[in-house]
């Protein structure tokens, strides 16, 4: 049992060494047989032609190129190593002879989970890799609602990693389609940052008191309460340190006198 665990640990460390190499594409291609020995599920990808105008490599070549294009982030590169591993199982050809791989993200995620479990990967790391693989090719509208939904599902940190996976994936495809796809990713990143800034502003401006508190210090029910709350909100937007219950009540009591 201990020997099996040691072997699995050595295997995943070897994968890390290969994908984190300065020239990861060359390293993976030169050590193809070793990769297949560690991940037999990768063998069908080697030489599997995609027959798509969006791709210039076979599946394995694309995987190696995508890993190489990625930032030097272990989680991102591991996700890219597995992101298309399920493609051979999903291959379909349309009436024009163009290859398609519908649902390959989910199939790849299942394979990834099996492989990383077998290799005794850290459970949290494994789950993050599987999530990135599952969603790497999802269609997403360039709008606040879609970005907010995905951030809510996978978390902001993993959403940022997801964008890096998407970028590397695109950079390993046909260059003539690169600009449009990279622009979409950039727009998604801008939307996420805008949502984050807005959420931070909302949190800062969320008052530590309410209308009930103003009633409690002598305000009469009516428009004056809403007006005072607006004034307080403007005040704390300019200086968040003033958003304290004692300060807000003191400022409000002065106004009410």
Image (cartoon, grey):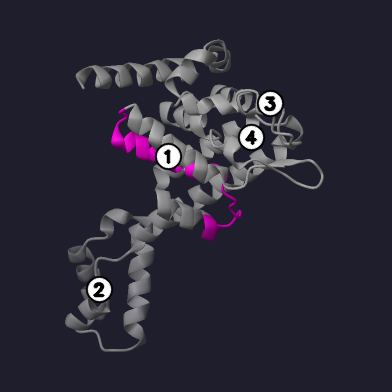
Give the label on residue 170, or none. Answer: 4
Displayed quadrant of residue 227: bottom left
Q: Residue furthest top?
A: 30
Secondary-structure class at tag 4 = helix
Q: Along the polypeptide, which appears first: circle 3 or circle 2?
A: 3
Secondary-structure class at tag 3 = loop
Real-space CA distance between mark 4 and mark 2, rounded to the nearest whole angstrom: 56 Å
Q: Along the polypeptide, which appears first: circle 4 or circle 2?
A: 4
Residue 142 visible in the displayed image: yes
Q: Nearer the viewer, residue 35 or 149?
A: 35
Real-space CA distance between mark 4 and mark 1, rounded to the nearest whole angstrom: 19 Å
Residue pointed to by mark 1: 130
Give the label on residue 252, or none. Answer: 2
Q: Along the polypeptide, which appears first: circle 1 or circle 2?
A: 1
Closest to the camera, between mark 3 and mark 2, is 3
Real-space CA distance between mark 3 and mark 2, rounded to the nearest whole angstrom: 68 Å
- Contact (CB < 8 A) between labels 3 and 4? no
Q: Residue at x 24, y 17 (%)?
A: 3
Per the rendered image, the range of residues in magenta is 120-146
């Amino acid at each position: 049992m201990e020997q099996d665990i040691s072997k699995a640990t050595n295997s995943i460390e070897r994968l890390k060494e290969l994908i984190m190499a300065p020239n990861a594409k060359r390293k993976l291609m030169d050590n193809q047989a070793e990769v297949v020995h560690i991940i037999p599920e990768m063998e069908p990808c080697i030489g599997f032609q995609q027959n798509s105008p969006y791709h210039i490599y076979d599946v394995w070549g694309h995987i190696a190129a995508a890993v190489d294009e990625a930032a030097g982030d272990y989680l991102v590169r591991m996700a890219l190593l597995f992101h298309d591993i399920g493609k051979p199982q999903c291959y379909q050809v349309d009436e024009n002879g163009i290859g398609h791989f519908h649902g390959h993200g989910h199939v790849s995620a299942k394979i990834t989970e099996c492989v990383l479990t077998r290799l005794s990967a850290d459970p949290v790391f494994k789950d993050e890799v599987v999530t990135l693989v599952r969603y790497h090719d999802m269609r997403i509208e360039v709008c606040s609602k879609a970005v907010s939904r995905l951030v809510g599902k996978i978390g902001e940190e993993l959403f940022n990693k997801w964008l890096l996976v998407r970028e590397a994936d695109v950079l390993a495809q046909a260059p003539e389609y690169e600009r449009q796809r990279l622009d979409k990713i950039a727009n998604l990143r801008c939307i996420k940052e805008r949502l984050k800034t807005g959420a931070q502003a909302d949190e800062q401006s969320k008052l530590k008191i309410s209308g009930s508190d103003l009633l409690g210090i002598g305000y009469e029910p009516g428009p004056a309460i809403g007006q005072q709350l607006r004034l307080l909100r403007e005040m704390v937007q300019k200086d968040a340190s003033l958003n304290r219950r004692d300060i807000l009540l003191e400022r409000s009591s002065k106004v009410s006198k």
